Image (cartoon, rainbow, N blue to C red):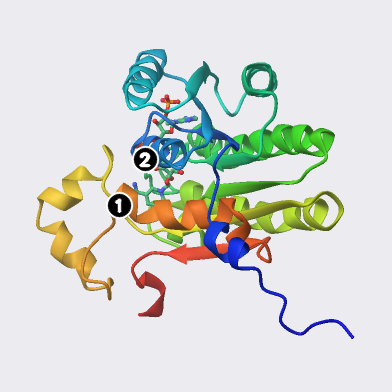
Amino acid sequence: MAKLVDLEKDYVLNMFSVEGKVALVTGATGALGKTLAKAYGYAGAKVMMTGRSEDKLKALEEEFKSEGIDCAYFIADPAIEEQVDALIKATVEKYGEINILAIAHGYNKPQNILEQSVSDWQYIMDADCKSVYIVLKYTAHQMVEQGKGGAIVVVTSQRSKRGLANYTAYCTSKGGADLMVSCAACDLTAEYGIRVNSILPTVFRSELTSWIFEGDAYKGFLTRQPIGRLGEPDDFVGMAIFLSSEASKFMTGGNYDCSGGYLVM
Ligand code: NDP
């Protein structure tokens, strides 16, 4: 008869490890992308960072290397298929494989549906949804070819689950990305061992949101935050490493709240 409890001590001690893995991080020039890239690097992963801003990527590479992190960068727009194809090839050329994908790029320009042009709406859909599809698909192809599974973590938003004035593009694209994660898990996990999950943050400090932290708006936001504060980029590191590691081996297709309790009120 199979043992009911078959737990190895080594498994427990190492289950959060991403050491030696190759992590590809999109939006690495942004607040969260940089933080996640550095976290994977501190945890012993080799990190390929991507974004569209060469100056920022170059500076990140210098900063990370000075801390002993094994990293490189490749410039690519995640919504352009040829550039993503080149990114995957460059990552494999540099590090031999890809084990973890963290998608942390994103864009928003809030506008009322009555004032927003269709092309402005489409731009956000491309930046936040089509781009996720392209990066996820190309990375999945690479992971399938490698034949040893992988972990894909997509940063979406609490706004994927709730509407808001002026957010018909952002909420729609993030909601689409969350369902994409669930569908991709159905395509990729059982057959190929590639787990796909998303993290749903609430507002956290970045270039775009720093005004919230500095003004009266902050108090208003706190009325919906049981944890008593808004987020900082490092609040999401634990969840990202968890979803990238063996510790989450039974989790796929999920959209995981990481919002200081935003959804409970
Ligand atoms: P930042 O604005 O700090 O960085 C986002 C990065 O995405 C940028 O560095 C940029 O890199 C890239 N980017 C910007 N515009 C585009 C575009 N049109 N197409 C492709 N890439 C683009 O973002 P955050 O770190 O604040 O956010 C990270 C993720 O978390 C995003 O998906 C965001 O939607 C989500 N999120 C953020 C919240 C917050 O409060 N900040 C709350 C909830 C979710 P480059 O210009 O080099 O390409």
In depth, the one of 190 and 30 nearer the eye is: 190
Q: Disc 1 designates what residue?
A: 204
| Residue 162 visible in the current orientation | no
Q: Disc 2 designates what residue?
A: 35
How many labels sit on residues? 2
- State which quarter of the image contains the C terminus: bottom left
State whether label 2 is within 8 Å of ligand 1: yes
**Which numbered disc flags the more N-terminal residue, 2 or 1?**
2
Position in image of residue 226 (x %, y %): 27, 76
Residue 247 to residue 79: above or below: below
Q: Amino acid at mark 1?
A: Phe
| Residue 140 visible in the current orientation | yes
- Dot 2, crowdedness within 10 Å: few (<14), some or many (≥20)? many
Residue 16 to residue 207: above or below: below
User: Which residue occupies 66% across, 33% down?
Assistant: 98
Position in image of residue 116 (x %, y %): 44, 40
Provide the secondary structure element on which disc 2 rests: helix
